[in-house]
Amino acid sequence: MTASLEVVALEPTPDQWRWSFGGGEPLLTVAPGTVVELTTEDCYAGKVRSVDDLPSVVCRFPYLNPVTGPIAVEGAEPGDTLAVHLVDIAPARDWAVSSTFPHFGALTTTHSTAMLHDPLEELVWLYEVDRERGTCLFRPRRGGPEVELPLDPMHGTIGVAPASGEVFASITPGAHGGNMDTPEMRAGTTAYFGVNVPGGQLSIGDGHCRQGEGEVCGTAVESAMRTVVVVDLVKGGGPAWPRLETDEFLASTGSVRPLEDAYRVSQHDLVTWAAELTGWDRLDALQLVSQAGLAPAGNVVDTNYTMLAKLAKRYLPGAVAADGVHQRLRETAAAYLAQR
């Protein structure tokens, strides 16, 4: 690496995994602009390794969804914006798993959606991951054709320490980020988080080889990951909810219940963001977002639901988000990838 490109590694041992956002001391402190090479374990903490390993038997509740971190960023203060660019996300193993859980998922009885019928059966699927070909293989448990799916690696869980000294379980998404489970959180995306505590305290985990919008069964193609991020700081301007930027889109998130309020939060944030970036009146921004916006689901299974509101940047003439940090971090990512 060049002398100007600072690269550090973070590979926590199981005793260093965290199960929450907030309340913990950082495992690592970095300067803004640092490239971090890190590892994450899957949502089962690596304990589900075959179709016979039922999560309710081999996993210890509530120790699910471990995250790597926290990572403190020098100079980050409440009110600032923490920018996290996902450079590379790669499965760490040649297999991944998914499952149905009793009382968890969008199409079953849960603790908060009480029904008299039995919950879905607990079942595990083992996926063969071909990292060279970029595929994962779906094998049905009870007959029928196998289906080869393209890898689309992403992180379901990423965020910062919450405000007001609160601590949230890693499975819970909210204004701090957390378990948003959006497939948009893939390599090439820059995520923006409002800093709530000194250092910001970034954590990341819950790698998915791929996931459909909504994560309807409750789990994705869950995998341990080797991930590279660039972490940067924009002074001030901390968003109320996590925001995303890619080369083509801006997106806002909302993570609450019920689902329609998650939709409203994300749309409200995108409308106000578009107005700020362009100088439009808020109702003009509402009109434009209404006609050109997209609304992909993140998750409809977690303790809070997550919705996104997306708008193509070509509809925002002259707009530059977060002082142009996305483009700068893309250049840092390109320099890193060219030299590793």
Image: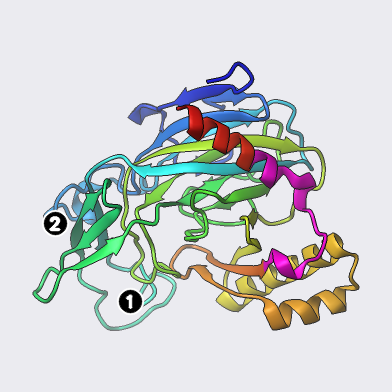
Residue drawn 47% across the image and 24% down it? 9
In the displayed structure, does residue 273 sit left or right of residue 301?
right
Helix, strand or loop at label 2? It is: loop
> Which of the 4 image quadrants contains residue 325?
top right
x then y, percent, for residue 233: 72, 36
Q: Does the magenta stretch include residue 315?
A: yes
> Which of the 4 image quadrants contains residue 90?
top left
Residue drawn 26% across the image and 59% down it? 98
Q: What stretch is highlighted in magenta?
A: 312-329
User: From what the image shows, is residue 202 above or below residue 123?
Assistant: above
**For the view shown, which residue lies furthest in the front direction?**
338
* Disc marking residue 108: 1
Helix, strand or loop at label 1? It is: loop
Its colouring scheme is rainbow
x then y, percent, for residue 259: 56, 75
Dot 2 corresponds to which residue? 51
For the C terminus, the image quarter is top left
User: From what the image shows, is residue 209 above or below residue 200?
Assistant: below
Number of the front mark, 1 or 2: 2
x then y, percent, for residue 74: 69, 25
- In the image shown, does 24 or 327 lie closer to the viewer? 327
What amino acid type should be assigned to the residue bearing mark 2?
Val
